[in-house]
Amino acid sequence: MLVPADVRYAIKPESHGNAFYLVIGQNRRPWLYPDLYYANLRSQEKSDAIPGIEMADFDLMALAMAHKVDLDSQGRLLIPARTFDWTGMKKEQPLTLLGVRDHLELWDRNDWEAKRKALLEQSAEIAQRARQARQTP
């Protein structure tokens, strides 16, 4: 997958790194974190000798299933085949790369268009729920 030039230029090797970590996000989409940012996220997490089942499951999802992927000299990422298997995405389908807060997400283009339309139709309700979530301690 070709990473657009504007995304590549926004990534600073000295602070973000030269590669990405690909994890399966909560929405079952591939999420990409710059490698140094991902390492910082991992180091901030509390580590217990015997974590609870929820934390152990999260660690399996966010750490054990993570893959380091490098940008090649032409600005492309090689997405592991098992990522497509795990997420139900098809290699043959066009992909859309989205910037979402602190990571990039890969979406099947048709799925993204359907989601985008649904978000636009529900924008007032989504904004209200977000305001309520910010106000809840």
Image: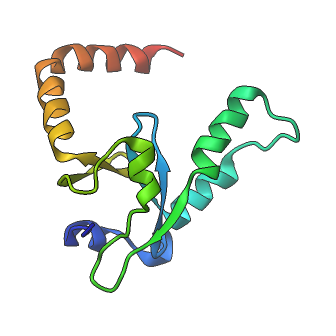
Q: Is residue 31 visible?
A: no
Frontmost residue, 10 versus 110: 110
Residue 43 at what x, y percent from top left?
69, 54
Image-quadrant location for residue 25: top left
Relative to 56, say whether 76 is above or below.
Answer: below
* 118 relative position to 75: left or right: left
> Split into 4 quadrants, where in the image is the C terminus?
top right
Residue 94 at what x, y percent from top left?
17, 54
- Residue drawn 37% across and 13% down? 132
Q: How is the image coloured?
A: rainbow
> Split into 4 quadrants, where in the image is the N terminus?
bottom left
Image-quadrant location for residue 126: top left
- Residue drawn 25% across and 20% down? 127
Q: Is residue 93 visible?
A: yes
- Residue drawn 41% across and 37% down? 28
Relative to 118, say whether 116 is above or below.
Answer: below
- Residue drawn 28% across and 56% down? 91
